Image: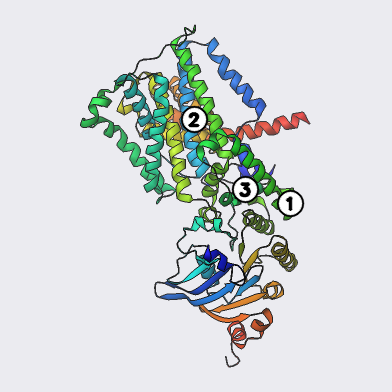
Amino acid sequence: MTQAQLAQGNAPLLAVRDVSVVFGGIIALNGVSFDMHKGNILGLIGPNGAGKTTLFNCLSRLYQPSSGDILMEGVSILTRPPHRIAEIGIGRTFQNVALFPNLSVLDNVRVGTHSRSNSDIISDSLRLGWVRRGEAELNKHVHEIVTYLGLDDVAHTIVSGLPFGTQKRVELARALAADPKILLLDEPAGGLNHEEVHVLGDLIKRIRDERHMTILLVEHHMGLVMSIADHVVALNFGRKLAEGTPAQVQADPDVIKAYLGSKDQ
Amino acid sequence: MSAVEEVVTEAPAVEAVPKRAMTLGLGTSLVVLGALVLAPLFVKNFIIFQMTMLLIYGLAVLALNILTGGSGQFSLGQSAFYAVGAYTSAILMEHAGMNYALTLPIAGLICFAFGFAFGQPALRLSGIYLALATFALAVAMPQLLKLHFVEHWTGGVQGLVVTKPDAPFGLPMGQDMWLYYFTLVITIGIYIASVNLLRSRSGRAFMAIRDNEIAASAMGVDVALYKTLAFGVSAGITGVAGGLGAIAVQFVAPDSYTITLAISLFLGMVVGGVGWLPGSIVGAAFIIFVPNIAESISKGLSGAVFGVLLFIVIFLVPHGARQIAIVAQQVLSKFKK
């Protein structure tokens, strides 16, 4: 309880503490720390190979940090197996879209609710009363999200046949279905055109405001990050290079050097 | 119609099925049910026996369909689960004097446990490697049943003779017909439960794992649990089918449950349409009747004829009976317009 109480007020929702990841002899992340505060959009930027995705995968427990800790509302997540991350309120999307290609849009979103529902194979096979009621409730919730993201027209379509941009929205819908506290977005603008990126930026802000989520945005697209993030963390070669408001980070000489190279070169 | 194009144009290793397309419509289901209920009234006992076997193999193919079509795991070891179910029923009936109907849930439970346990090491394997591991299970099973220290129970190489049950409550029907209707009720029950399962949260978890394990895990699906559960459910249903098979054939022997049976069931699944549950019965019909047809065409070359027939089927309808059903549906909907 005390930890949960601590987490309220000014304490960060998610705290990354001195996290290092070593693969063989390669240091992918070197003592990275930052905080995520409730209701913020945090942009994580950096050139290719900076360690963005490595950090992201630590948060979703695909990688185990060699040292350091990651705290969700004051409690370490590092003892949890990957499939028990969703239930504490961390949802994610994937860089290159990892949907269930042979399921319909609705079913993809339904799987997104897995962590917030319960069932067992016996009750499911017999379709007991409480299973039926649960499914009815779930369907209402799923339809609400599908409508929210404007996917009604394709709700019953198998996702593998949908355009890439739509698939990305389905993935977002699937992540939203669990009502996460923190939404991790791995390069949501990747593969989208200029127009679509603009729409996406508005959508992310809307999700933050209307669905009360805290968002971690890992992104290459500088324009998007700088226009919607409240706070930006820049990584390079596994180290934190700079941290602050978008304007501060953009003006940081180290960041400019990392992206554009120094004048001497 | 995009779902149809999907089916015809793409051929992934495990052909996947949207949930809605996994079952038949209400009308079609009633027609099939009516045919299954009425048919035995007009045919001879041997045909009734064959129809019983059709249902039993249908169940076994359905079980494999849940595993492969549902959760995306391959198995060439279904004959082992079938054998365990058959022997469980036979031993309980002949050694413990138990009622045949009561042996079936026990056979199902034992096979569920066996499948669930086998699923644990199988977690480390996938695709063709899993197929090989299950293949090993199928190869080992007949010899395990012949082992000296279980011979007292299993009857060793000789096997066990099982008594065929009479119709209860003085019902005016022969043994074969009673057993057919008994099997039919169980088959329908299991079919409905399977459809429910695949349409539920658990079924969605199976299919999510089949399509993308990492994403499934990120959504909170315990991949290891659901993979082993799928093995357990599949083995359990196969066990019930095995028990029914033992009662229908009135005999169990190790060499009835070789790898050939496992491959036949696999064949039945492919011919019926992977992941399409109603196709299971079509697949079962194929593995029961087509060898007979082949034999009637040429006694000496029945195997070769069977091979040619199989080749023709795979070539013409690679997605099995399901493909035919979809085409039929298209034609019907055109007529309606």
Chain name for mark 1: A
User: What numbered label is drawn on residue A110?
Assistant: 3
Q: Are marks 1 and 2 in contact (CB under 8 Å)?
A: no
Q: Quadrant of residue A196?
A: bottom right
Q: Looking at the picture, how far across and down is residue A83, in whole percent?
A: 50, 55
Tell whether A5 sits left or right of B175.
Answer: right
The kind of residue tagged 3 is Arg
Report the front residue among A87 and A26.
A87
- Location of the C terminus of chain B by quadrant is top right
Q: Quadrant of residue A178?
A: bottom right
Chain name for mark 2: B
Q: Identify the element where label 1 is drawn.
A: helix
Task: Give the CA separation, mark 3 to mark 2.
Answer: 42 Å
Looking at the picture, the colour scheme in use is rainbow
| Label 1 crowd bin: few (<14), some (14–19), many (20+), radius 10 Å | few
Tell us which disc is closer to us: 3 or 2.
3
| Label 2 crowd bin: few (<14), some (14–19), many (20+), radius 10 Å | some
User: What numbered label is drawn on residue A147?
Assistant: 1
Tell us which disc is closer to us: 1 or 2.
1
